[in-house]
């Protein structure tokens, strides 16, 4: 009986979280009754999704977006939950680390040293790339697109070294990051030689949890 009662409570809670409604009624089980007279479950599921544009302008650049993500968390009203930060690019990553000027310089130099742009990466052999099946416009359109493709294999590799996203717990309405942890966007495919116009990168932020009310 105890297992069945526990399963019923778990199902009720899951429904409240997934469907976005509150359970104001009191749920009482024999197991709970032995500890306290009643056990109440009352909460509202909240979610907030936003996209932000981050301007980058170096071969490998790093941008601190901690304050912007914290603002989304506060706007959501979430008290207990998780915020996920995702880069919508295959050459842009997201990481948690200290955003200190000299460390940022160290990190940029290290990434370019372990993944050198001038290495003979196969991905950069543009002429040998086969087009995807059913490419819109056929082979001619694929060849035209291919000629505009930059030799950026190193940028893709740096991205998967850094990682695409971070998921951060929210407790008592705040992100549970450390004093010296910042949410950093790493663009590994900025304008070559620190020249040219800055790039605009899209970062997705989604908050999920409960409002604690």
Image (cartoon, grey):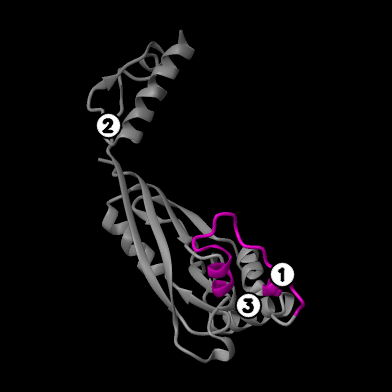
Mark 3 Cα-neighbour bin, 10 Å: few <14, some 14–19, many ≥20: some
Seen at 69% across and 73% down, the residue is 127
* x and y, in percent, of residue 67 in the image: 37, 69
Residue highlighted by disc 2: 42
Mark 1 Cα-neighbour bin, 10 Å: few <14, some 14–19, many ≥20: few
Q: Is residue 121 above or below residue 134?
A: below
**For residue 37, what is the image quadrant?**
top left
Residue highlighted by disc 1: 128
On residue 107, the disc is 3
Q: Is residue 27 above or below residue 71?
A: above
Q: Is residue 138 left or right of residue 207?
A: right
Tag 1 near tag 3, CB within 8 Å: no
Q: Nearer the viewer, mark 3 or mark 2?
A: 3
Nearest to N terminus: mark 1 or mark 3: 3
* x and y, in percent, of residue 120 in the image: 77, 77
Seen at 25% across and 32% down, the residue is 22
Q: Which residues are magenta?
A: 119-145
Q: Nearer the viewer, mark 2 or mark 1?
A: 1
Q: Is residue 37 above or below residue 108?
A: above
Seen at 48% across and 63% down, the residue is 87
Seen at 49% across and 60% down, the residue is 136
Please name whichever residue, 109 or 146, is drawn nearer the observer in this view of the structure.
146
Label 2 vs label 1: CA separation?
Answer: 60 Å
Label 3 vs label 2: CA separation?
Answer: 46 Å
Query: Does the rendering let one see residue 173?
Result: yes
Query: Does the rendering let one see residue 91?
Result: no
* x and y, in percent, of residue 101 in the image: 54, 83
Which secondary structure, mark 2? loop
* x and y, in percent, of residue 153 in the image: 66, 72
> Residue reaching furthest right?
120
Mark 2 Cα-neighbour bin, 10 Å: few <14, some 14–19, many ≥20: some
Q: Is residue 135 magenta?
A: yes
């Amino acid at each position: 009986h105890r297992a069945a009662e526990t399963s019923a409570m778990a199902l009720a809670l899951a429904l409240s979280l997934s469907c976005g409604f509150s359970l104001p009624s009191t749920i009482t089980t024999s197991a709970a009754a032995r500890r306290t007279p009643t056990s109440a479950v009352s909460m509202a599921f909240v979610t907030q999704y936003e996209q932000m544009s981050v301007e980058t302008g170096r071969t490998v650049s790093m941008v601190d977006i901690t304050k912007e993500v914290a603002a989304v968390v506060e706007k959501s009203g979430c008290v207990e939950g998780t915020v996920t930060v995702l880069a919508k690019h295959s050459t842009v990553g997201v990481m948690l680390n200290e955003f200190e000027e000299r460390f940022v310089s160290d990190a940029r130099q290290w990434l370019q040293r372990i993944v050198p742009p001038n290495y003979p990466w196969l991905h950069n052999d543009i002429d040998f790339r086969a087009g995807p099946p059913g490419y819109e416009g056929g082979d001619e359109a694929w060849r035209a697109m291919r000629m505009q493709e930059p030799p950026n294999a190193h940028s893709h590799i740096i991205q998967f070294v850094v990682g695409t996203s971070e998921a951060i717990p929210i407790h008592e309405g705040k992100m549970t990051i450390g004093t010296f942890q910042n949410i950093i966007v790493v663009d590994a495919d900025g304008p070559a030689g620190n020249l040219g116009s800055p790039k605009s990168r899209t970062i997705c932020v989604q908050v999920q949890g409960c409002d604690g009310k």
